[in-house]
Amino acid sequence: MFETLILILDATLRVSTPLILAALAGLFSERSGIVDIGLEGKLLGGAFAAAAAAAVFGSAWIGLLFAIAASVSLALIHGFACITHRGDHIVSGVAINTIVAGLTVTLGLDWFSQGGQTPALTGAARFTPITLPFADQVAEVPVLGLIYSELLSGHNILVYVAFLMVPLTYWVVFKTRFGLRLRAVGENPHAVDTAGISVAWVRYRAVILCGVLCGIAGAYLSTAHNAGFLKDMSAGKGYMALAALIFGKWRPVPVLLACLLFGFLDAVAVRLQGVSLPVIGEVPVQAIEVLPYVLTVLLLAGFIGKAVGPKAIGKPYVKERA
Amino acid sequence: MNQDTQSYAIELEGISKRFGAVQANKDIALRVPAGTIHGIIGENGAGKSTLMSIIYGFYEADAGVIKVDGQAVDIHNSQDAIKAGIGMVHQHFMLVDNFTVLENIVLGAEGGALLKQGLNAARKELKRLEQEYSLDVDIDAKVEDLPVGLQQRVEILKALYRGAKVLILDEPTGVLTPQEADHLFRILSSLTEQGVTVLLITHKLREILASTNNVSVMRQGEMVAHRVTAETDKDELAELMVGKKVRLKVDKEAAQPKQTVLSAEQLCVSDSQGVERLKKVSLELKAGEILGIAGVSGNGQSELLNVLSGITPMSSGSIAFAGQRITAEQPKTAAQMRALHMAHVPEDRHKMGLVTGFEAYEAAVLGYHDADTYNGKILMKRQAMVEECQARMAAWDVRPLNPHLKTANFSGGNQQKIVIAREVEQNPEVLLIGQPTRGVDIGAIENIHEQIVKLRDAGKAILLVSVELDEIMALSDRILVMFDGAVVGHVSAEEADERTLGLMMANAWQEPQGASA
């Protein structure tokens, strides 16, 4: 029983990783006032770029760089539409998602001729598990040994990066000048403008950071969690990250917890596939998979606390004519 | 006058600014002696706020020179203005509500990439400023928890923290209670003792007379006069502010008012913040008369229109209309008021009067779309709507005469005619009409005025709200003046002149008692 729990938690960490990275990406964007429903597209674009570059160059790290570059480019398109041209954030985000969904498959077919997939990645083209020091030695120690060797050790570097990003994001958002301006611009851009700071520049930087984190999340999907790119492999993780962002009320630590909760539900769903529970019988996987969205809707409807986003979110900034 | 020996904190020469067709500022010259409070007064749209926004770098002037302490400076954005030692307290505070006072103050002047040292340094500096200028605020409080008076103090501290030597305040007392306003003026005068120069923009004559050293008057984008406050008085200022305008002529017979059709008792309205916007307004409206509501915009006229038409609920008071008594407990919606034959031409035709994406014939039935004439239960009676609209447009001389043209594509005057025709053709008992000729060309103004008078002569009761004093004086049979949410004056059309109304609008009117005026 304990072992099963550890295995489920272990899986939770692996499924949560892209959620955490993407949700933190969304946190930067949305804290600056830019709605980002395009997390999904950036995730998918990053995954494709990472797998394609890793397949060609044989290096997961080069893949990661390409993933970040692709994702940041998409983020800049979103920024150009929403910040410079004051376009509708949702429309721009959905457009990016749609384009990326088609483009990745089309380019994949053209470049690799494997039905839209990239070649299977092996060796250095993938991020491989890292065994933490002494993991093997302590494996036999009851409880703690298992937690250390199974749960904490044996993940690839990007998993650790994702978790480190949480305190780092917290620090940037709440302890730095950039963070203060970021939060201010999402709440009242007029205050930022009259303080002599460029609203657009702060927002562009936020959007670029969002791109970087989504790129890492994408690379994780195709070069760490899986061994290559598959059509639509982001499978709604971008939307789930967005839900986690709202569920965590745009704050890094609660967002982490929301991601872990959603990841846990996902891991449980996989585990319960085809298993017949006593009394209830077989639980349809979909019933569990839908929970993150149901929870988010309940939250938004005001049943679990209250989710109040940045005040100026989704509103283009226009200097008003006095 | 020893003005030549004085040093000037701010000098403006030939400042001009145009927004499209509107010349907001025209060849403005202004000299503000250092260490004084300098008032700038003018009516709505006189160009005061634009001028201040230019000094603060929010807009760039098309032409002209700005000098600070005798040196010409280039101000392209707010950062430049801040560097030149200019600070501004905006009418609507530029604060981040869920930040602390301290965070708001350091925003944009954090002093380093990490917040900690910056915040600590700011904390010390603010202690000093608070003591020097006796501006107490709890700097760790969240701004949203502070009353407006304190929020304004935060804005002042924000400017001083940036080393402002010139402080611009745009209508600073609009949101303050009288006590808070008094306190503000005490703060301002202590600031000038410390060498700060204050530019005070307001339309309230009393504040100018009570607190400034010098005063400049703006009218229609131009600087029309400079006075030493001690050498002028409210009558002169009011006249300068309003100007001797060419009287608008409207041919009309004397009114023949009949029975009272609408009476309001002690109406109060509070906004979502709980601030009282309408304060115990009582009025009576008779059939066959035009009652004009004068006032500088934002003094409760919009709230009055909205509460009478049923758009906003009243917080207390009552309205008697069409045999019904409407109170806060027994409210009526806008649709119910319409059904009782109260028509409403809203002040902002784009936001409230029209759906600009609709074709003219659709816009022409808004609010009455459930009437059997238009509503065929399942489908709208399109043919009937178009035909009726066509006939109305012809009668009201709406051009182009095309019921299928989108309302956005008509000129302002023709849009307004569509709205007024829609309301008037329903044959209402009472017509509430707000800013009927705002943004309307001269030809259409005449036409609209004639129609309003015609409606009055047909025995209808009309309540006219306008910020155009000419219009009020030309059309009204009786005039109420509003200030700060309350009715402060009541004059008949014969007694009304610009000066009296100007003084009332600035809440500086005193009943003439013998010789003292």
Image: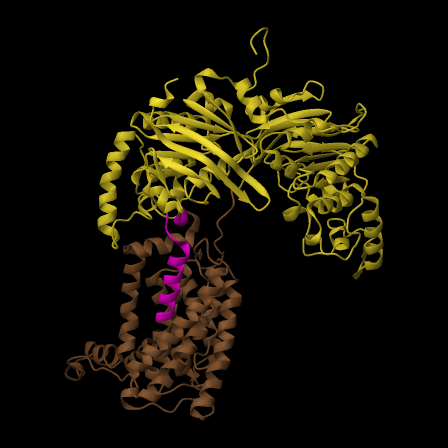
Could you say which chain is coloured yellow in the image?
Answer: B
Q: Where A102 falls versus A164 (above or below)?
A: below
Q: Colour of chain A?
A: brown
Is A163 magenta? The answer is no
Q: Which percent across, then down, holds residue B71?
A: 33, 36
Residue for point 52% across, 19% down: B234
Furthest residue in direction bottom, as rendered: A113
Q: Which percent across, then down, holds residue A184?
A: 38, 52
Q: Where B53 falls versus A49 (above or below)?
A: above
Please give the range of residues in magenta.
A192-212
Give the position of the C terminus of chain B as an image quadrant.
top right
Residue for point 32% across, 58% down: A173
A289 left or right of B381? left
Magenta stretch, main secondary structure, is helix
Occupied quadrant, residue A309: bottom left
Give the position of the N terminus of chain B as an image quadrant.
top left
Residue for point 38% across, 91% down: A119
Q: Is residue B287 visible?
A: yes
B456 left or right of A32? right
Q: Is residue A18 visible?
A: no
